[in-house]
Amino acid sequence: RDNQLKDFPIPVHCGPSKTCHWLTLVDCAKYLSTKPFSLSSYPVDFVVLSFYKIFGYPTGLGALIIRNESLKLLNKENYFG
């Protein structure tokens, strides 16, 4: 495929920087209902999703996926809502 990010509202552009580190969060709730998303292809720090938007019926479940390198930024070890 020529451009995997063409369906994103705003393309994700990130990479290593020596002067600063921008944290990136992608809300994949709507995107994952129609397309796959590879964390190895897009090095984002956080991905949030809602199973309601993926499967189309209310489940009350969601997820926060955190890159291992970014996990140290959180103070708590368990997050439940």
Image (cartoon, rainbow, N blue to C red):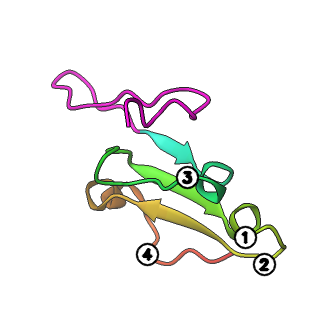
Q: Nearer the viewer, residue 21 or 32?
A: 32
Callout 1 secondary element: helix
Q: Is residue 53 left or right of residue 28?
A: right
Q: Is residue 59 left or right of residue 30?
A: right
Camera-side mark, 4 or 1? 1
Callout 2 secondary element: loop
Position of the C terminus, as image quadrant, is bottom right
Measuring 20% from the left and 26% from the top, which residue is drawn there?
17
> Mark 3 vs mark 1: which is more N-terminal?
3
| C-beta proximity under 8 Å, tags 1 and 2 | yes
Q: Position of residue 34 (x, y in %)?
A: 63, 54
Camera-side mark, 2 or 4? 2
The dot on residue 55 is 1
What's the residue type where badge 2 is placed? Thr
Position of the N terminus, as image quadrant, is top left
Tell me, yes or no, whether the highlighted magenta stretch contains residue 70: no
Measuring 49% from the left and 56% from the top, which residue is drawn there?
36
Q: CA gap, disc 2 to disc 4?
A: 24 Å
> Which residue does the numbered mark 2 point to in the structure image?
59
Q: Identify the magenta region.
A: 1-23
The dot on residue 77 is 4
Number of numbered labels in the structure image: 4
Task: Work out whether 38 lies above or below 60.
Answer: above
